Amino acid sequence: MAGALSADPSTRPGQDGAVVTFLGLVRNHNVGRRVRHLEYEAYEPLALKAFERIAAEIAERWPSARLALHHRIGRLEIGEASVAIAARSPHRGDAFAACRYAIERVKQIAPIWKHEYFEGGDVWIEGATADPDDARARAEAERVACA
């Protein structure tokens, strides 16, 4: 059974008009290989500090936004959720921006490692796996890293 890491600051009932969610799912393929399952490991004390840092960065950039962030650790099967993010704000623009920022920063700074088991072998993957078809995601990741 997989464990979890979470950061979920208090919410403000009635004040927020938008909640944007992101669920990262285990795909059945990566970089041309058929994936069987994944295992995530994390250095939990530093991962939680990274989550707190991400929440603080979001609070600075989008003061009205709040973030809930949850990343599973352990073995995950195809189709299972590995990461869940919810960003809430009085307005949708800030909620969308904060949610996108959060997932990019998790991939950049959280000490979470993915062990990918595929047909014919396995490999450790650190941080983000580039999607060759997602030029916008790559550009956003670069913009976030430089900001």
Image (cartoon, rainbow, N blue to C red):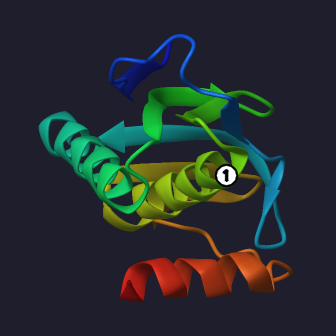
Q: Position of residue 10 (x, y in %)?
A: 35, 18
Q: Position of residue 58 (x, y in %)?
A: 38, 53
Near-viewer residue (5 or 142): 142
Quarter residue 85 falls in = top right
| In the image: residue 118, left or right of residue 68 | right
Task: Examine the rendered structure and indicate whether residue 105 appears above or below residue 75.
Answer: below
Determine the residue positioned at 55% across, 78% down. 141
SS at circle 1: helix
Q: Residue furthest left?
A: 45
Q: Position of residue 68 (x, y in %)?
A: 46, 29
Q: Amino acid at mark 1?
A: Phe
Left or right of 18 in this view: 104: left
Q: Which quadrant would the C terminus be assigned to in this image?
A: bottom left
**Residue neighbourhood size for the residue with mark 1, other residues' Cα within 10 Å, grouped as few (<14), some (14–19), many (≥20):** many
State the residue at coordinates (32%, 45%).
Answer: 55
Circle 1 residue: 96
- Residue found 17% across the figure and 43% down from its top: 49
- In this rendering, is residue 105 above or below 48? below
How many discs appear? 1
Percent position of residue 134, x then y: 80, 78
Give 94 or 136, whichever is nearer the viewer. 94
Question: Relative to 145, is 120 on the left or the right?
Answer: right
- Residue at 36% across, 40% down: 41
Q: Quadrant of residue 52?
A: top left
Residue nearest the observer in this picture, 11 or 131 = 11
Quarter of the image where one finds residue 90: top right
